[in-house]
């Protein structure tokens, strides 16, 4: 007996990608704080815009998460009119 599952909503993939980027940004912030202070343009720009980058990543994660959950909610199960209990027998009303 094969269990056919519907495909994941594409926004779940966006959520995973944005979450991974968020974790990478946090690790870069920690590395930037613990590294010896050598002047470089890349580090100065990262330190300047790190807060905005994090805020944008959190916003993308939230929008994609709620969008994916809302998209899943719009698709009802194929047989939503029939409700069975754990043994597969119809429930008594």
Image (cartoon, rainbow, N blue to C red):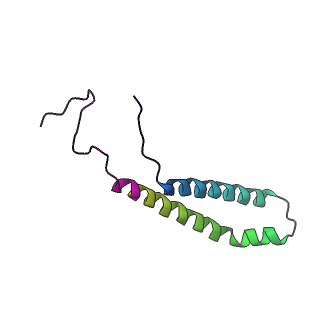
58, 16: nearer the viewer: 16
Q: Nearer the viewer, residue 30 or 12?
A: 12
Q: Position of residue 48 (x, y in %)?
A: 72, 73
| Residue, far left | 93
**Quarter of the rendering occupied by the C terminus:** top left
* Secondary structure mostly seen in the magenta stretch: loop
Give the number of marks. 0
Q: Residue at x 39, y 58 (%)?
A: 70
Above or below — where is 85 with respect to 5?
above
Q: Position of residue 19 (x, y in %)?
A: 59, 55
Task: Give residue 86's quadrant in the image.
Answer: top left
Q: Quadrant of the N terminus?
A: top left
Q: Is residue 39 magenta?
A: no
Residue at x 31%, y 50% (from the top left corner): 76
Residue in the image at 85% along x and 70% along y? 40
Q: Position of residue 3 (x, y in %)?
A: 41, 35
Q: Is residue 42 left or right of residue 3?
A: right
Where does the magenta region start and end?
71-89
Q: Is residue 8 above or below residue 59?
A: above
Residue 57's quadrant in the figure?
A: bottom right
């Amino acid at each position: 007996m094969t269990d056919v599952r519907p495909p994941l909503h594409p926004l779940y993939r966006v959520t995973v990608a944005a979450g991974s980027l968020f974790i990478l940004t946090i690790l870069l912030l920690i590395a930037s704080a613990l590294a010896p202070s050598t002047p470089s343009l890349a580090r100065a720009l990262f330190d300047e815009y790190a807060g905005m980058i994090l805020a944008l990543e959190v916003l993308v994660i939230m929008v994609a998460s709620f969008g994916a959950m809302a998209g899943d909610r719009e698709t009802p199960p194929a047989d939503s009119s029939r409700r069975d209990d754990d043994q597969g027998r119809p429930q008594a009303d």
